[in-house]
């Protein structure tokens, strides 16, 4: 049976989910690369992976994300980065969207309230698929960090506060800390999955990886040639689920992922499989709620 056939058959009971997630992480641990290392990101750039970070390539990363309840576009997904330190409960999802040069003129006219409204609408649309696959619905609460764009480095950062709809208001909230690096052919998206109780410290990871990513010569934003290169049908506003995204029929919350059973991201000396099993034995049932970043 092909990998695609396996990952699309989302398990509906907790035991099957855990088994699939453990199998996915075992595959990831065997296929990945330890930092420090230079990771080639398709034909576009290089990521200087720091020490104590671990890179999971595309096929194994897709399986992990789908086991966590995510809908993933195979064509844009590049890989995952996770931390190996004891208290690391984060994951970074790397994608490359090759849809042409993104004009950044509209960055001067952000309307954070309007963007937030569109993201909430996108979350409700995505919930239809989550319910059908047996995962909890998500609710967007508000900004953690409104969109901020650096026109010099062509980097964009923004983040939302979100949660499972069935979670109490005082429960730890889900966080997708989104960072983008624009290039000549499109852009890289580095999406940090974390939680509200950890994001103040974890967001440094996203900024570190964003600064450690560089485009190859000829693929940089400044290498754009107006006479020959393709220009994207949307501007920078679409990358934060804005009006442009809605006009194009794009899913406003397409960059949102769920991080469940975060403590399984453990490459312990006692053995990867044993670490996962110990986690599942000690974890109370009501602590297995999905985490969205």
Image: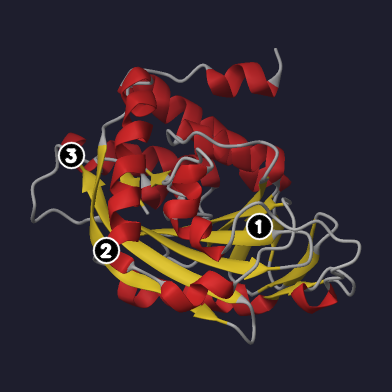
Disc 2 residue crowd, few under 14, some 14–19, many 20+, Cα 10 Å: few
Disc 3 residue crowd, few under 14, some 14–19, many 20+, Cα 10 Å: few
Residue assigned mark 2: 113
Residue assigned mark 3: 165
Confirm or deny contact between disc 1 and disc 2 (CB under 8 A): no
Q: What secondary structure is marked by label 3? A: loop
Q: From the viewer's perspective, is residue 226 above or below residue 185?
A: below
Residue 124: quadrant of the picture? top left
Residue 289: quadrant of the picture? top left
Label 3 to label 2, Cα distance in Å? 21 Å
On the rendered image, what quadrant is the N terminus found in? top right
Residue 254 seen in the figure: no
Residue at horizontal 19%, vertical 34%?
285
Label 1 to label 2, Cα distance in Å? 36 Å
Residue at horizontal 71%, vertical 73%?
36
Residue 245 seen in the figure: yes
Tell me, for residue 186, which label it has, or none.
none
Q: Position of residue 218 (x, y in %)?
A: 89, 71
Tell me, for residue 55, which label it has, or none.
1
Q: What secondary structure is marked by label 1? A: strand
Give 227 or 13, whichever is nearer the viewer. 227
């Amino acid at each position: 049976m092909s990998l695609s056939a396996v990952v699309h058959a989302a398990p509906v009971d907790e035991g099957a989910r855990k088994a699939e997630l453990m199998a996915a992480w075992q595959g990831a641990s065997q296929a990945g690369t330890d930092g420090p290392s230079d990771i080639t990101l398709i034909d576009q750039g290089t990521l200087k992976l720091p020490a104590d970070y671990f890179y999971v390539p595309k096929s194994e990363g897709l399986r992990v994300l789908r086991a966590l309840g995510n809908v993933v576009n195979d064509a844009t997904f590049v890989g995952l980065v996770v931390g190996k330190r004891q208290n690391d409960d984060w994951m970074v999802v790397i994608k490359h969207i090759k849809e042409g040069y993104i004009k950044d003129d509209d960055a001067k006219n952000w309307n954070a309230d309007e963007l937030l409204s569109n993201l909430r609408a996108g979350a409700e649309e995505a919930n239809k698929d989550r319910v059908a696959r047996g995962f909890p619905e998500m609710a967007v609460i508000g900004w953690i960090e409104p969109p901020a764009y650096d026109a010099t480095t062509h980097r964009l950062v923004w983040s939302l506060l979100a949660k499972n709809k069935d979670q109490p208001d005082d429960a730890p909230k889900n966080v997708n800390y989104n960072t983008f690096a624009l290039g000549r052919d499109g852009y890289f998206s580095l999406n940090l999955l974390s939680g509200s109780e950890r994001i103040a410290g974890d967001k440094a990871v996203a900024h570190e990886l964003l600064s450690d990513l560089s485009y190859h010569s000829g693929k940089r934003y400044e290498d754009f040639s107006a006479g020959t290169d393709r220009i994207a049908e949307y501007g920078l506003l679409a990358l934060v689920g804005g009006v442009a995204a809605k006009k194009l029929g794009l899913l406003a919350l397409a960059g949102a992922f769920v991080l469940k059973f975060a403590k399984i991201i453990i490459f312990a000396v006692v053995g990867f499989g044993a670490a996962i099993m110990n986690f599942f034995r000690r974890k109370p049932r009501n602590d297995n709620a999905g985490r969205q970043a």
